Image (cartoon, helix red, strand yellow):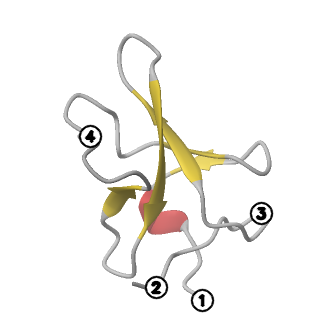
Amino acid sequence: MKKLLCPQCRIHRFRVFNAARESVVVTVNEHYEVVPIHEGVSLEGYFTDELHCLGCSWIGSPKALLNRY
């Protein structure tokens, strides 16, 4: 699976939040699917349309990520 990169700092790990501000660490594959890094973790109830980069202050949509693997 190829992972898309942050447009600002070029890392591939992000955080998504739910309404209770709980978070899950994710990556985004080349099909723009948000995938949790730990198996068995569900993204149900999480806002997967807003990613928070773990390496910088960037916040944005999966569609804004870079596909330079």
On the image, the x and y values in percent for residue 3 come to 50, 77
**Lateral position of residue 17 relative to residue 53, left or right:** left
Task: Quickly name the residue at label 1.
Answer: 69
SS state under label 1: loop
Task: Quickly name the residue at label 4.
Answer: 43
On the image, the x and y values in percent for residue 27 come to 47, 61
Q: Give the CA separation, mark 4 to mark 1.
A: 24 Å
**Residue located farthest toward the top when viewing the structure as drawn:** 20
On the image, the x and y values in percent for residue 49 come to 37, 46
Q: Which comes sooner in the sequence, label 3 or label 2? A: 2
**Closer mark to the observer between disc 4 and disc 3:** 4
Give the class, few, some or many, for how many residues have Cα within 10 Å of label 2's Cα (few <14, many ≥20). few
Q: Identify which amino acid the numbered label 2 is placed on.
A: Lys
Place residue 43 in its image quadrant.
top left
Q: Which mark is residue 8?
A: 3
Residues at discs 4 and 3 in contact (Cβ within 8 Å): no
Q: Identify which amino acid the numbered label 3 is placed on.
A: Gln
Q: Give the CA separation, mark 1 to mark 3.
A: 14 Å
**Residue located farthest toward the left when viewing the structure as drawn:** 44
Residues at discs 2 and 1 in contact (Cβ within 8 Å): yes
**Lateral position of residue 12 relative to residue 54, left or right:** left
Give the class, few, some or many, for how many residues have Cα within 10 Å of label 4's Cα (few <14, many ≥20). some
Q: Which mark is residue 2?
A: 2
Q: Quadrant of the C terminus?
A: bottom right
SS state under label 3: loop
Q: Which comes sooner in the sequence, label 4 or label 1? A: 4
Q: Which comes sooner in the sequence, label 2 or label 1? A: 2
SS state under label 4: loop
